[in-house]
Image (tube, rainbow, N blue to C red):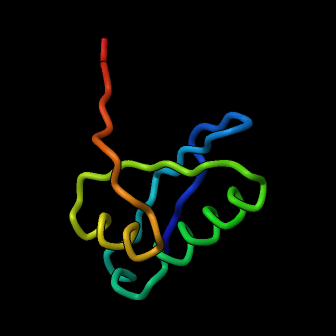
Amino acid sequence: MATACVTAMTDQVARIGYVCTLPAYRNRGYASQLVSALSRDMLAQDVTCTLGYSNPAAGRIYNNIGYTEIGQSLILVR
């Protein structure tokens, strides 16, 4: 139905990614629940959570959870 995971982690920061929901299960709150649970687990370990998005709907989900936008994510591909 839906997935989300920690894609990279140090002792201070965790990157949450691969957040997706199958089309038939969208708009039911699954992505919100997964990202929220992962974020709570990381925060309980005193780890700062980060994530990036390109989909405005995803941005609304993350803002509703409590994430604050502080800039842009960039990638350099060889």
User: Which corner quadrant holds the C terminus?
Assistant: top left
- In the picture, residue 59 is in which quadrant? bottom left
Give residue 70's position: percent from left, percent from top. Answer: 34, 48
State whether residue 27 is above or below residue 38: below
Question: Count of labels shown?
Answer: 0
Depth order, front residue of 4/43:
43
Residue 72 horizontal/vertical position (percent):
28, 41
Q: Which residue is drawn at the image coordinates 31% and 52% (left, top)?
A: 53
Quick one: which residue is furthest to the right in this view?
45
At 41% from the left and 70% from the top, the residue drawn is 21
Q: Residue furthest bottom?
A: 28
* Res 9 quadrant in image: top right
- Residue sitting at x 25%, y 70%: 57
In the image, 30: left or right of 40?
left
Q: Is residue 59 left or right of residue 68?
A: left
Figure check: 36 above or below 71: below
Residue 65 position within the rendered picture, expressed as x and y whole percent measured from the top left: 47, 73
Q: Residue at x 67, y 67 (%)?
A: 40
